[in-house]
Amino acid sequence: MAEQRPIVTEKQSDVAIVRITRPEVLNALNLATRKALAATFTELQDDPEVRCIVLTGDEKAFAAGADLKEMVDADAVEIAKRRTERYWQAIARTPQPVIAAVQGYALGGGLELAMICDIIVAGENAQLGQPEVRVGIMPGAGGTQRLTRAVGKFHAMRLCLTGRPISGREAYEIGLVSLVVPDDEVMATALKLASDIARLPPLAVTSIKEAILQGENASLDAGLALERKAFQLLFASEDRREGMNAFIEKRKPQFKGK
Ligand code: HXC
């Protein structure tokens, strides 16, 4: 029997929902799934109607990591030749904000995938971790880098060196997720955030995302310069004139994305 599509995309007005659909293996990320994710995000980048994206799995798992059955017999050359980083780059380069809605397991490559997103909403009982060390490898797509930038050296060391997962609640306490909510409210919370963001002027939204992400990799001075230039450039947009005038005239703004 042919395997069902590894991801499903649905649009709810100006929000796209991308769902990983391999429940039989807790949404383990095989190559087909990663390729489908990359293709979907590449397509969504060019869809002017999509203002925000929610990436999710199901109630048992966001994703339980790279598919170990696809890795068990691979040698180092084969792993390098797969160049799987290109699939993640397609997601990382998406200009619209991406919200990860995490219930259940977000482990290994699954947590790395969530960390590529811009906002993470987690259920209280989600399980987030970098268990790679337990199968003789290490994080390979951001688990030692994005995680350390997010939570600092000491929490990152604990997570990566023990492989032990933490709950959504603890992830929130250490700054690994943006919000923690009861498990059955994860999707509704993520969708509400997404529709709030989707209503805001898109040029400002994408400029903010770009400044935060680029600034993370730059010196403070370079980041501040980049921020200042992006701020100045927004004064060329119709939406900022509309936003300010609407405030002064005490009416609701009508943003056009121009
Ligand atoms: C392939 C997986 C999988 C995975 C679960 N499954 N995780 N298959 N790769 N990463 C499959 C199981 O084999 C099983 O299928 C089914 O999903 C249900 O899993 P169970 O183990 O029976 O469920 P449970 O006992 O509830 O345990 C859940 C779990 C455990 C704790 C999440 O499945 C687990 O430890 N999974 C591996 C997690 C992991 O190590 N992830 C990191 C991978 S390395 P069958 O057919 O057997 O019933 C990685 C590197 C990224 O991510 C590098 C990026 C470049």
Image (spheres, rainbow, N blue to C red):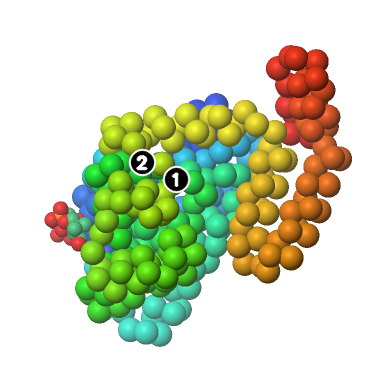
Image quadrant of ligand 1 equals: bottom left
* 45 is higher (above) or lower (below) than 257: below
Q: Are marks 2 and 1 in contact (CB under 8 Å)?
A: no
Q: Is residue 152 left or right of residue 106?
A: right
Q: Looking at the image, which is closer to me, 173 or 182? A: 173
Q: Is mark 1 within 8 Å of ligand 1?
A: no
Q: Residue at x 70, y 47 (%)?
A: 207
Measure how far apart labels 2 and 1 are at the Cα level: 7 Å
Q: Name the secondary structure under disc 2.
A: strand
* 137 is higher (above) or lower (below) than 88: below
Residue at the far right in the pictured view: 236
Where is residue 256? Give x, y as percent.
75, 28
Name the residue that disc number 1 marks: 178
Where is residue 89? Give x, y as percent.
54, 62
Which amino acid lies under the numbered mark 1 shown in the image of this protein?
A: Ser
Instruction: Examine the rendering and report whether any part of residue 6 can be seen.
Output: no
Q: Looking at the image, which is closer to me, 38 or 242? A: 242
Which amino acid lies under the numbered mark 2 shown in the image of this protein?
A: Val
Q: Residue at x 23, y 54 (%)?
A: 25
Where is residue 133? Give x, y as percent.
27, 75
Q: Residue at x 22, y 73 (%)?
A: 134
Q: Name the secondary structure under disc 1.
A: loop
Say which quarter of the image contains residue 48. top right
Check disc 2: other Cα within 10 Å, few if <14, some if 14-19, many if 20+: many
Instruction: Examine the rendering and report whether any part of residue 12 can be seen.
Output: yes
* 133 is higher (above) or lower (below) than 199: below
Check disc 1: other Cα within 10 Å, few if <14, some if 14-19, many if 20+: some
Name the residue that disc number 2 marks: 180
Q: Looking at the image, which is closer to me, 122 or 105? A: 122
